[in-house]
Amino acid sequence: MRTVREAFFEVARQLRLTTMFGNPGSTEETLLANFPEDFRYVLALQEAPAVAMADAYAQRTGHAALVNLHTAAGMGNALGNIESAWYNRAPLIITAGQQTREMLLLEPYLANKEPLEIPKPFVKWAYEPARPEDVPGALMRAYAMAVQPPMGPVFLSIPMDDVDKPCPKLPPIRKVSRGLGADPHCLKELAEVLSAASSPVLVIGGAVDQSHGWDAGVRLAERLRCKVYAAPGEGRPGFPETHPLFQGGLKSAIGPACEQLAGHDVILVIGAPVFRYYPYVAGDYIPEGSRLFHITDDPNEAGRAPVGDSILADPGRTCSVLAELIPQTTREAPAQLPALAEPDTHSGITADQLYYSINQVRPDHCVIVQESMSTLKLLRQRLPTSRSQSFFSMSSGVLGYGLPAAIGVALAERDEGTDRKVIAIVGDGAANYVIQALWTAAQHKLDILFVVPRNGAYNILKSFANLLHTPGVPGLDLPGLDFLALAAGYGVPSERITELAALDGALRRGVAMVGPHLIEVAVDATVPSLI
């Protein structure tokens, strides 16, 4: 009779969950013993980067991913990036070992005292099987929960003595619908309102791309010939930022966002919350006299929206259905955003100059992964995304995502056979949360160019301090960091750029390099405006 361990891996095999990201501990070793040859274990040197790698891998491939963490301690290390996976809607099946059942009553060393509480509220489902033989069935249910809309992480706690117990039978492997419908009958009224609108506007979020609606969103916008904004706080675009109708990002504060939407009588938000605000700036949610409609596959998003009428539907399919229902408008298209001027080259290397230079040398088919929060708006303007699944970031605001996420994307590019170059732009503050992820990039020989804008500070926090009028906050400067030494310690070649004349050549070398390469770029430390 097969064991629980053998049954677990057979269920995972049939669900195509043959890549596992993790950092094992003693309570996980019983599950991982005699690890199957047809599985791959992607080792991270700490639990937080393991989750970020899996998150980005799952987003890029569109499939669920397995994550293996270490009991309570590892879950604690990983929780920030579990939150990011929640907001990124990444379908992760997170497992952690638990102490032997015989000792749980005693709360022994390395026991997970409250295994189902630690990951909450950032998992869709958390479970510790009541019987050893329930472990494989719990994996099947965890998969079903993770991939249902809205996709997201789930958690299984597995007692370490369960895995060698007999498992009489495998659970049935079930197919689970991974998308809601978009009923034309239910969308007819919305189509009529949009058709009759004098000045409609679209606000599109990352769930449109996640639900394969990138091209349909373009068709809808072109039918309406209306302005399109990116929803605030999204980790991936849902609409090409090079399209003539694209107007940039909607601001993430109540009053300023309302001002941007002034003059529009109908506002349609697709595939994003309404809205993700921070910082707080008072104002009305939408202009007086405007109507807002909200398309989401997440009942929680629909419930917490402060204004508007929400419709539960698949965002991508909704774009397609509406594009069929709405007649081609005869109104003139809105004016395009003016092109950005070339950056000033007389003030050394600014973030503006860095992103401009990256855009000049990056391949047409590449993927940008970013975590440079203080200059994110500028980054998006200088490095616009024109293709589906070509830009990834975190949606949570928790630092420590971008560097390992680039590894997850690069692994997915290799597995999918697309092999696009990955360019990871990660600030010096964010990079040091998970700098050990460089080791995994080196071990797997992944084609990633890591660019670290080195401003010597948590500049995003300085921007907040200016807005909040909180001078004298400690701990915002980061002197003495040496990314060349750090990269060398993990086996990644690197170089440092301090002069503008050397920047272009370094970036071209980095893009052409096979395997991982890191460039530390000393950039101007001027604190940008937050809004």
Image: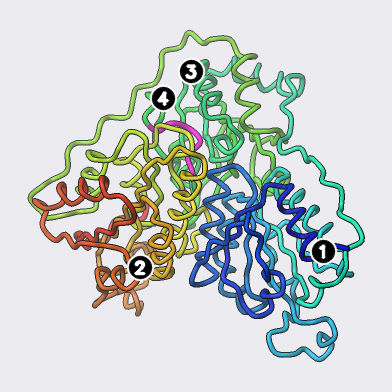
- Under mark 3, the amino acid is Glu
Task: Write down the residue under mark 3.
Answer: 222
Mark 4 crowd level (few <14, some 14–19, many ≥20, 10 Å Cα): many
Considering only vertical position in the picture, is 245 above or below 402?
A: above
Of the numbered discs 3 and 1, the one sitting upstream in the chain is 1
Q: Nearer the viewer, mark 2 or mark 1?
A: 1
User: Which image quadrant is residue 134 in?
Assistant: bottom right
- Under mark 2, the amino acid is Gly
Residue that appears at 32% across and 29% down: 337
**Quick one: SS at disc 2?**
helix
Considering only vertical position in the picture, is 414 above or below 433?
A: above
Q: Nearer the viewer, mark 3 or mark 1?
A: 1
Q: Nearer the viewer, mark 4 or mark 1?
A: 1
Alpha carbons under labels 2 and 1: distance apart: 40 Å
Of the numbered discs 2 and 1, the one sitting upstream in the chain is 1
- Under mark 4, the amino acid is Leu
**Quick one: SS at disc 4?**
loop
Task: Write down the residue under mark 4.
Answer: 245
* Residue 135, disc: 1
Q: Nearer the viewer, mark 3 or mark 2?
A: 2
Residue 328 picture location, percent across and down:
53, 10
Q: Residue furthest right?
A: 168
Mark 2 crowd level (few <14, some 14–19, many ≥20, 10 Å Cα): many
Query: Tags 3 and 4 in contact by the CB under 8 Å rule?
Result: yes
Q: Which residues are magenta?
A: 236-241
Task: Write down the residue under mark 2.
Answer: 429
**Quick one: SS at disc 3?**
helix
